[in-house]
Amino acid sequence: MRILVTGAAGFIGSKLSERLLERGDEVLGFDNLNDYYDPKLKEARLARLLPRERFRFERASLEDRDAVDRVFADFKPERVVNLAAQAGVRYSLENPRAYIDANIVGFLHILEACRHNGVEHLVYASSSSVYGSNKKLPFAVEDSVDHPVSLYAASKKSNELMAHTYSHLFGLPTTGLRFFTVYGPWGRPDMALFLFTRNIIAGKPIDVFNHGKHSRDFTYIDDIVEGVIRTLDRVPGPDPTFDPLNPTPATSSAPYRVYNIGNHRPVELMRYIEVLESALGKKAELNLLPLQPGDVPDTCADVVALQRDTGYTPQTTIETGISRFVEWYRAFYNV
C-alpha cells in the first residue's frame, strides 16, 4: 500500500515507517523536524529511513495547508497515519497556541485532505491524557472523557470529535489510538526514562514528581507499533451494535473507532526507577517533588477492545524494555 505517515521523524513515526517498509509498503514521511526537542535526534531517526528504496520524505508542517494538499495530490496515499502533533502535557502550559496550530488546525488539514482524496482509512494519535481526572482504573474506551486537565489532552479529545464528524458526514473510516506512556530505544528526550537515564549517568539528581507515587502503563515501542499496524490494516465500518439511546465514545453508527493502546500492566514509578538503576548499575539521587499541574497520578489501559478486534497482545516487560533502551542510549551517546 501507499501509506502517508506524518511525524515520521518522531519516536513512534520513525519506527512505524521502518516496519511498514520492511513488509513492503511504500511510505511517504511528513515532518517539520521542529525544535521542541533536539532536532539532531529526529535527523538521526530520519537518516535510517532515507536510504530505503520505497521511502520518500517531505519536510513541512501540518499547519501548512498547501504542503498537505500537495503531498496528498502527488503521493495519492491509500491510508494515512497521523502521528504529527505538538506533544507534551507540561509544555502546553507554556505555549498553548502551538497545540491549537498543530493539533487542531493541522488535524483539520489532514481530515480535509483525506476526505477529498478518497483515503481508505485514517489512523491518528490520541492520548491516554484524555482520561484527565478520571479515577476509575483501568481506563476503558467506553468511559467518559469530558474532564481533561491539560490543553494537550483537550486537543486530543478534540481530534476524536473532529474525526467522528468526518466519519459521520463523509463516510471517512477513522481510528483513534490512545497511546499510554510509550518508551524504548530512539525515545523522546522529554520523557521520564530519557531524563532519568541522562541524569543518573551524569551523577545528577532526578526529579520525581508526586513524590514517586505515580503509576504508569509503560508500553514498549515495538508493542505500540504492532498495535498501530493491526489497526491500520483493519478498516472500521459502522458498529452494528451501536445504540444511540446508550451511546459509547468508542464506536458509532459511522465508520469510527477509538482504542486504548497500552500494556495493561501499570508499574509504580519507584519500581520503574529501580529497574533502570539495575540496568545502569548505578543508584539514582531522588529529588522528590509534588504533582505537576496537568499531570494525572495513575494510568492503566483496558485493551480488551483492541485485543478483541485485532488480536493485539503486548509482549514486552519493563525489565526487557528498559534494558534495550539503556543499551541503545549508551551506544547512541557513547557513554
Image (cartoon, rainbow, N blue to C red):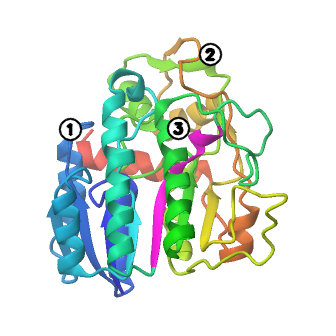
Mark 2 — residue? 211
In this picture, which residue range is highlighted in magenta?
121-131
How far, Cα to Cα, is label 2 from label 3?
23 Å
Q: Position of residue 251 (x, y in %)?
A: 69, 65
Q: Secondary structure at mark 1?
A: loop
- The amino acid on which the numbered mark 2 sits, given as a three-letter code, is His
Badge 1 or badge 3: first in the primary sequence:
1
Q: Position of residue 199 (x, y in %)?
A: 37, 25
Q: Are marks 2 and 3 in contact (CB under 8 Å)?
A: no
Give the number of the disc on residue 303.
none
Q: Is 87 left or right of 35, judged from the image as shown?
A: right
Mark 1 — residue? 35
Badge 2 or badge 1: first in the primary sequence:
1
Q: On the image, which quarter does residue 266 sit in?
A: top right
Q: Residues within 10 Å of mark 1 (few under 14, many from 20)?
A: few
Task: Using the image, determine if residue 287 lies above or below residue 73.
Answer: above
